[in-house]
């Protein structure tokens, strides 16, 4: 797949920074949902939809790994996954989508803005590492919004 953005970005290993953004955000969100069951249920439904949609899109839209991909190494999950690199879980970016879903679920405007800013930085870092195509990263917030909206509707029922 021809990706103009990736062709102009030199690939670099920025795994450490990627997980320094996403893991604290997830930890903070868990701390927030412990005190708010409605937010927790919305997030759970949204994440269930997000995971199901990723499975379907990965199955239906098989993409080869981007040129110059630098394998993403999670310092915490390397124990679970080992050194086996996953390279075909491309469309859409689960890391970006998860962070966007977290931002959508949060209720405090300042917290939302911080998480959305972190999601934007994360998206750029994923492109720098050539882990995803630009389309994968751009599509992630759209999917997140849809699944947050569905989760919100189910929570209100």
Image (cartoon, rainbow, N blue to C red):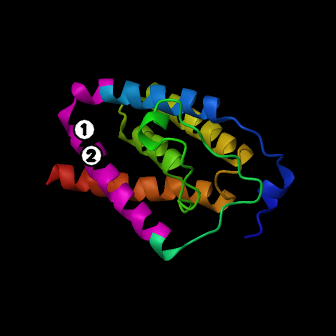
| Picture quarter with the N terminus | bottom right
Asked whether residue 32 is drawn in magenta, I would say yes
Q: Give me the C-alpha separation between circle 1 and circle 2.
A: 6 Å
**Residue 113 in sight here:** no
Main SS of the magenta part reads: helix
Image quadrant in which you'd find residue 150: bottom left
Q: Is residue 142 magenta?
A: no
Q: Residue at x 68, y 40 (%)?
A: 125
As helix, strand or loop, the secondary structure at mark 2 comes to helix
From the viewer's side, name the closer residue of 81 and 106: 81
Instruction: Look at mark 2 in the image and give the residue it sits on.
Output: 44
Q: Residue at x 84, y 46 (%)?
A: 10
Q: Quadrant of residue 32?
A: top left
CA neighbours of label 1 inside 10 A, class few (<14), some (14 to 19), many (20+) = many
Left/right placement of residue 95 relative to residue 15 reads left
Rendered position, 84 above or below 143: above
Number of residues whose C-alpha sits closer than 10 Å to that of mark 2, classed few (under 14), some (14–19) or many (20 or more):
some
CB atoms of marks 1 and 2 within 8 Å: yes
In the rendered image, which residue does mark 1 sit on? 40
The residue range painted magenta reads 31-58
| Residue at disc 1, secondary structure | helix
Looking at the image, which is closer to me, 89 or 2? 89
Q: x, y percentage for residue 93?
A: 54, 53
- The x and y percentages for residue 104 are 41, 42
Residue 152: percent from the left, percent from the top? Answer: 27, 50
Q: Position of residue 67 (x, y in %)?
A: 76, 59
Question: Which residue is situated farthest in the bottom direction here?
Answer: 60
Q: Residue at x 36, y 40 (%)?
A: 105
Q: Is residue 94 visible?
A: yes
Q: Quadrant of the C terminus?
A: bottom left
Left or right? Give the position of 75 relative to 34: right
Judging depth in this view, the residue of 90 and 118 nearest the camera is: 90
């Amino acid at each position: 797949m021809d990706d103009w953005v990736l062709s102009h970005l030199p690939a670099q290993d920025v795994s450490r920074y990627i997980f320094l953004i996403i893991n604290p955000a997830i930890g903070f969100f868990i701390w927030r949902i412990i005190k708010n069951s409605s937010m927790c249920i919305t997030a759970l439904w949204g994440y269930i939809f997000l995971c199901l949609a990723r499975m379907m899109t990965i199955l239906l839209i098989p993409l080869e790994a981007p040129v110059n991909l630098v394998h993403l190494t999670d310092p915490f999950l390397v124990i679970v996954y080992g050194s086996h690199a996953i390279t075909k879980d491309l469309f859409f970016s689960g890391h970006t989508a998860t962070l966007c879903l977290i931002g959508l679920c949060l209720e405090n405007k300042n917290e939302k803005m911080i998480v959305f800013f972190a999601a934007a930085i994360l998206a750029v870092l994923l492109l720098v590492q050539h882990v995803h195509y630009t389309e994968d990263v751009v599509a992630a917030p759209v999917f997140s919004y849809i699944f947050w909206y569905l989760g919100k509707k189910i929570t209100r029922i």
